[in-house]
Image: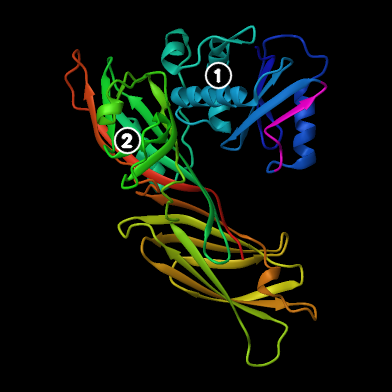
Amino acid sequence: MYISEIFITTTRGDILIHKKYRFDLDFDPKVIFLKKLRAVGNEHLLPHFKEDDVTFCHIKRNGLFIMAVTTCNMSPIFLVEFLTRFFLICKDFCGVVSEDAIRANVLLIYEILNEILEFGYIQLATTDKIKPYIQSDPVLVLANRSPAEEIASRLENRKNEIFVDVIEKMIVVITNDGLVSRMDVTGNINVKSFLSGNPVIKLAVNEDLTLAEQGKPKDFNSHVTMEQCSFHQCVRKEEFNTSRCLILNPPIGEFSAMTYRLASDPPLKPPFRLQVQEKDFDSPSRDTCLSLQLLSHIPENTEAVNIVLRIPVPGTVSGISQQLIGPDQTIELKASNKQIVWNIKKFPGGSHLNANLRLISNSGVKTRLKDIGHIVMEFEASGYTCSGIQIRYLRVFDRDQAYVPYRWIRYITVSDSYVFKL
């Protein structure tokens, strides 16, 4: 299996990088891709499509499209995995992968492409293997960062550090009577290592973790029950079954030490619930009054940030008036796609927020609760995982080095698809 061409383009269609490995195409794939991009737009472009038996596959990162083109029948998952590794390698060298960083490091990016592929065949796909062959020095470009990202960036510039992020993504569907009809949770333990020498890392998780795939009876008192899990090739698992400890010989840069999917039994408790009520006016009116209450069930010492609730409304709704109870909130009607968007900056655990809405109708038809579409919620909860998985300890051993490394551990849960049905 081989790749014919790779190119990187902006959302505007500017080609930043273009590398040909095989001259087996009768047309210019950039033209096809840009035509598709202009036809459907950035948000609706499929990550994988075919044109004249030629496969196009891309990932989108930081406003850039990273595209691979091949004439052979390759798995889209394989191509996405390869492009993601290429992105992470560029990130390890350049610090950030953005349009400015690519333009400043063109020669470096082409050197990476020369080493990662040979005549279209994958050769080297990790930072530590490629690093000895790279001659160009990276040109560091400052990215626009939030204060939290700026702090993390300063931390990463120090030597002998290791970062561990436990990230979980949720797919949840809650029916109009409050029952959870679907809850899928997948997680990653991501490690970013900047340790010198050849250290051995011991990373231990909950001892009461249960693996359903081992064929053992499920312990319903277990704090964490996993349906599936897989490990990076640098992970040794000889102590995992007995003490839930992973032994790592980490490569330089970022990698996923462990990926997992939580079992649906025993059932998990959703972190957020939404109660919606329709209220009638005392006087006859075509308008509709809705009362929304968003409840947080995450621990009180944590908080969710960047919460967005999207509420589809019928085309007859021409405007809204609102009353928000609680700080750091905004709500508005997006006339272009007929959505009410409720933005919340911070939402502490164990609390609730209220919003009273009046839907103003421009016709003689009154909007009812059944006319409103499914409400979609986006969020990021820091310091919290739905599974309850915890890093018990993170220890670094190196016989040849005498240093005390900095260790940073974070827990994050984000919504992949979180839907309330009305």
Please state the horizontal and vertical placement of residue 135, each as a whole percent of the image.
47, 10
Q: How many marks?
A: 2
Q: Secondary structure at mark 1?
A: helix
Name the amino acid type tagged 2: Leu
> 379 left or right of 58?
left
Write the residue at 18% across / 23% down: 403
Camera-nearest residue between 371 and 287: 371
Q: Amino acid at mark 1?
A: Ile
The residue to which callout 1 is attached is 109
Q: Is residue 158 visible?
A: no
Specify whether residue 16 is in view: yes
The residue at which mark 2 appears reads as 155
Whether 243 is among the magenta residues is no
Span of residues in magenta: 44-52
Q: What residue is drawn where x is 65% and y is 29%?
A: 58
The colour style of the image is rainbow
Q: Give above or below for 386 relative to 422.
A: above
Q: Position of residue 347 (x, y in %)?
A: 42, 61
Query: Image height check: is 101 above or below 359?
Result: above
